[in-house]
Image: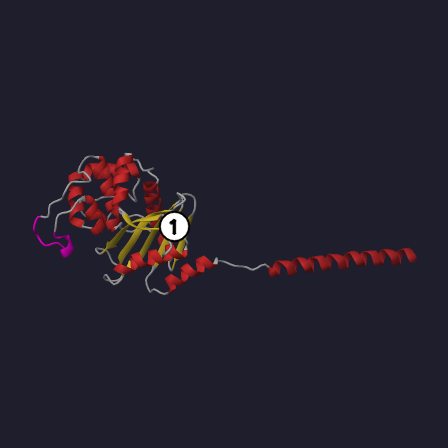
């Protein structure tokens, strides 16, 4: 009897200990904070919550793709590149000697869509002003056959140019996703695209926007007006003081030009919150 009592007490002790350990384990688990987003991510998300547009902001540092915004599915959705295609257009044109970085494209004297376009431009100046007619002329010089083969060679977007060599990036059928955009400009920043190094450097310089401290911003805007709904882009990369490159692409639904300034401003605000390109 005494032996049975002792054994019963031992079993009861083990059972109680196991229960206590299980309870402590549950208690420890329940005290671990379950946070879905970092404070930085929350601050970035707050920027998008303030706007009414469908938008996504994608970053790429050579290893990781990160997405922020109100409609993250846009990151993998293909849209016309609009004027962000000027980057590839310039690379193809310079690589194939269809123009030089110093050549002046003469204005024909006819009024253009924006009065600011009514003058002569170099390719770099036309990149900064987003002068569509200059890059349409460059595309015509390249021609449909070479343009098609070059897009296939570099794997740009869906690689479709249709029948109008000076319209396919403005109206379609060429489309590209924001994720494809960030990888393309990241490779440009690193000089890793299949173009001569000097050509990549020339186009990179055309994209220069501003410097903050030792960090430099390079970017190109885009506005697809010929599609419904309209699409807006702000695509580029930041070269940081430590040599790190962070590529980015803002893609958003546009509303009749009301969001023109928002593309760049929102991008700068996001880059600041992410610690990539701080306001001084």
| Residue nearest the observer in this picture, 184 or 172 | 184
Q: Position of residue 107 (x, y in %)?
A: 10, 48
Most extreme residue toward the right is 1
Examine the rendered structure and indicate whether residue 17 appears above or below residue 164: below
Q: Is any part of residue 132 visible from this angle? A: yes
**Magenta region:** 108-118
Q: Is any part of residue 159 visible from this angle? A: no
Q: Position of residue 168 (x, y in %)?
A: 21, 47
Q: Is residue 1 left or right of residue 279?
A: right
Examine the rendered structure and indicate whether residue 37 appears above or below residue 191: below
Image point 29% across, 53% down: which residue? Answer: 233
Look at the image and tell me in which quarter the C terminus lies: bottom left
Q: Position of residue 60 (x, y in %)?
A: 39, 47
Q: Which residue is mark 1?
A: 59
| Residue nearest the observer in this picture, 81 or 98 | 98
Is residue 33 within the magenta segment? no
Q: Is residue 193 left or right of residue 20?
A: left
Image point 15% across, 48% down: which residue? Answer: 133
Quadrant position of residue 62: top left
| Residue nearest the observer in this picture, 67 or 279 | 279
Q: For mark 1, give the secondary structure.
A: strand
Q: Is residue 15 left or right of residue 91?
A: right
Q: Residues within 10 Å of mark 1 (few under 14, many from 20)?
A: many
């Amino acid at each position: 009897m005494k032996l049975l009592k002792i054994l019963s007490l031992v079993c009861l002790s083990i059972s109680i200990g196991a229960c206590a350990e299980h309870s402590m384990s549950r208690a420890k688990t329940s005290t671990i904070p379950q946070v879905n987003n970092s404070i930085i991510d929350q601050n970035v998300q707050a920027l998008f919550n303030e706007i009414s547009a469908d938008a996504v902001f994608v970053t790429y540092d050579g290893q990781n793709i990160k997405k922020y915004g109100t409609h993250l599915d846009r990151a993998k959705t293909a849209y016309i590149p609009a004027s962000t295609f000027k980057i590839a257009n310039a690379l193809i044109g310079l690589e194939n000697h269809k123009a030089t970085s110093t050549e002046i494209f003469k204005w024909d004297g006819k009024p253009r869509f924006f009065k600011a376009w009514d003058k002569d431009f170099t390719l770099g100046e036309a990149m900064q002003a987003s002068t569509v007619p200059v890059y349409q002329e460059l595309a015509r010089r390249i021609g449909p056959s070479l343009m098609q083969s070059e897009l296939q060679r570099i794997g740009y977007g869906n690689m479709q140019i249709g029948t109008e060599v000076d319209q396919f990036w403005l109206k379609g059928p060429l489309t590209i996703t924001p994720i494809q955009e960030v990888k393309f400009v990241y490779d440009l920043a690193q000089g890793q695209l299949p173009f001569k190094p000097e050509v990549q450097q020339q186009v990179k310089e055309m994209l220069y926007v501003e410097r903050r401290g030792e960090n430099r911003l390079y970017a190109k805007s885009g506005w697809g007006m010929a599609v419904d709904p309209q699409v807006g882009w702000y695509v580029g990369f930041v070269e940081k003081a430590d040599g790190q490159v962070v590529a980015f692409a803002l893609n958003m639904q546009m509303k009749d030009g009301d969001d023109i300034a928002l593309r760049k401003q929102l991008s700068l605000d996001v880059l600041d919150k992410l610690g990539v390109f701080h306001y001084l």
